[in-house]
Image (cartoon, grey):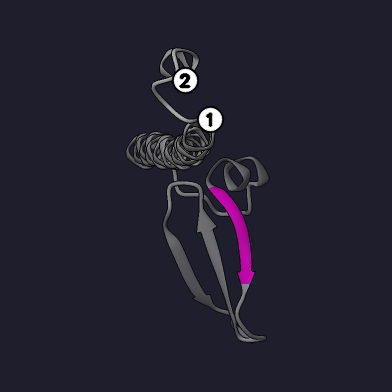
Amino acid sequence: MGLMAKGYLEPALFNTQKNELLKEAAILKEQKEAIKRAIDGSMTALDEVEKLLKFATKAEKQIDAFDSEIFEDFIEEIIVFSQEEIGFKMKCGLNLRERLVK
C-alpha cells in the first residue's frame, strides 16, 4: 500500500495483486484446516485404539450377553450391506463385516 501511495505502483496492478494474494491466502488457510482435521482425526483414532486395547487386555470374564454400554463405547455405526450381511464401524477405525445367522 505504501508503494501505491508513493506512486510507484499503479492502483489497477495493486488491486490485481492484492486479490490474487487474498485468494492464495484463503486456499492456504483451507489447506491448513484440512491438515489440522486429518491430524486430529488420527489422534482420535489412536485414542480409541488404546481404549479398545485396554478393554480387551483387562477383560477378566467372557461377555455372554449384549451390553449396550460396551457397544456404545466402541461402535460408531452399523452398516447394512444386505439382508444377510452387516458391518460395524468402530470408533478406532476398524470395520467388521458379519454374516447374519438365519
- For disc 1, the marked residue is 11
Residue displayed at 41% across by 17% down? 3
User: As displayed, is residue 86 above or below residue 15?
Assistant: below
Residue 32, picture quadrant: top left
User: What amino acid type is highlighted by mark number 2?
Assistant: Met
What is the crowding at mark 2: few (fewer than 14 residues within 10 Å), some, or many (at least 20)? some
Tell me if label 2 and label 1 are in contact, CB under 8 Å. yes
Residue 80 visible in the displayed image:
yes
- For disc 2, the marked residue is 4
Name the magenta segment's main secondary structure: strand
Q: Quadrant of the C terminus?
A: bottom right
Which of these two is toward me, 34 or 14? 14
The x, y position of residue 46, in whole percent, is: 35, 38
User: What amino acid type is highlighted by mark number 1?
Assistant: Pro
What is the crowding at mark 1: few (fewer than 14 residues within 10 Å), some, or many (at least 20)? some
Q: Is residue 76 magenta?
A: yes
The x, y position of residue 12, in whole percent, is: 53, 37
Q: Which residues are magenta?
A: 75-79
At mark 1, the secondary structure is: helix
Residue 60 visible in the displayed image:
no
User: As displayed, is residue 93 above or below residue 9?
Assistant: below
Which of these two is toward me, 49 or 24? 24
Residue displayed at 43% across by 47% down? 92
The x, y position of residue 81, in whole percent, is: 60, 80
Residue displayed at 64% across by 40% down? 69
Distance between the Cα atoms at labels 2 and 1? Answer: 6 Å
At mark 2, the secondary structure is: helix
Which one is earlier in the sequence, the residue at label 2 or at label 1? Answer: 2
